C-alpha cells in the first residue's frame, strides 16, 4: 500500500484506476485504505486538470 500510494503521482490515470481496482479486489469495496487511495487519485486528477487549464490560458495569452 505505501509503495503504491507513493507511486500514484508518477502513474497515468489508467494505472491509478488499475491500482484502485486491484485494491478493491483484494480488500473489498470498503476494506483496507481504499478511501485514501481514491482521495489521492482524485486530488492528482484535479491537479492535472488545473495545470492543463493554466497551460491553456498561458498559451492563449501568448498568442494575443
Image (cartoon, rainbow, N blue to C red):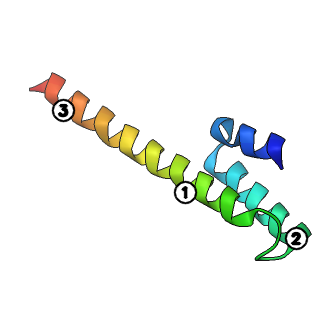
Q: Which one is in front in this view, the residue at disc 3 or the one at disc 1?
A: 1
Q: Earlier in the sequence, mark 3 or mark 2?
A: 2
Instruction: Tell me the quarter of the picture where residue 61 sits.
Output: top left
- Along the line of sight, which residue is nearer the eye, 46 or 13? 46
| Residue drawn at 24 percent across, 29 percent down | 59
Q: Secondary structure at mark 1?
A: helix
Give neighbour class at mark 3: few <14, some 14-19, many 20+ (Cα, 10 Å): few
Q: Earlier in the sequence, mark 3 or mark 1?
A: 1
Q: From what the image shows, is residue 34 above or below residue 54?
A: below
- Along the line of sight, which residue is nearer the eye, 9 or 36? 36
Q: Residue 14: x and y, percent?
A: 67, 53
Task: Residue at the far right: name it.
Answer: 26
Q: Spatial distance from mark 2 to mark 1, Cα to Cα?
A: 20 Å
Q: Which residue lies under the disc numbered 3?
A: 60
Q: Residue 49: x and y, percent?
A: 41, 47
Q: Secondary structure at mark 2?
A: helix
Task: Residue at the far bottom: name it.
Answer: 29
- State the quadrant of the C terminus: top left
| Residue drawn at 31 percent across, 42 percent down | 53
Which label belongs to residue 27?
2
Q: Secondary structure at mark 3?
A: helix
Q: Residue 46: x and y, percent?
A: 45, 51
Q: Are marks 3 and 2 in contact (CB under 8 Å)?
A: no
Give neighbour class at mark 1: few <14, some 14-19, many 20+ (Cα, 10 Å): some
Q: Residue 44: x and y, percent?
A: 54, 47
Q: Earlier in the sequence, mark 2 or mark 1?
A: 2
Q: Is residue 29 left or right of residue 52?
A: right
Q: Is residue 35 left or right of residue 54?
A: right
Q: Which residue lies under the disc numbered 1?
A: 42
Q: Is residue 64 left or right of residue 4?
A: left
Amino acid at each position: 500500500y505505501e509503495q503504491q500510494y507513493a507511486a500514484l503521482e508518477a502513474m497515468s490515470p489508467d494505472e491509478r484506476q488499475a491500482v484502485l481496482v486491484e485494491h478493491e479486489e483484494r480488500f473489498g469495496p470498503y476494506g483496507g485504505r481504499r478511501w485514501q487511495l481514491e482521495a489521492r487519485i482524485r486530488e492528482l486528477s484535479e491537479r492535472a486538470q488545473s495545470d492543463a487549464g493554466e497551460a491553456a490560458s498561458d498559451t492563449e495569452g501568448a498568442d494575443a
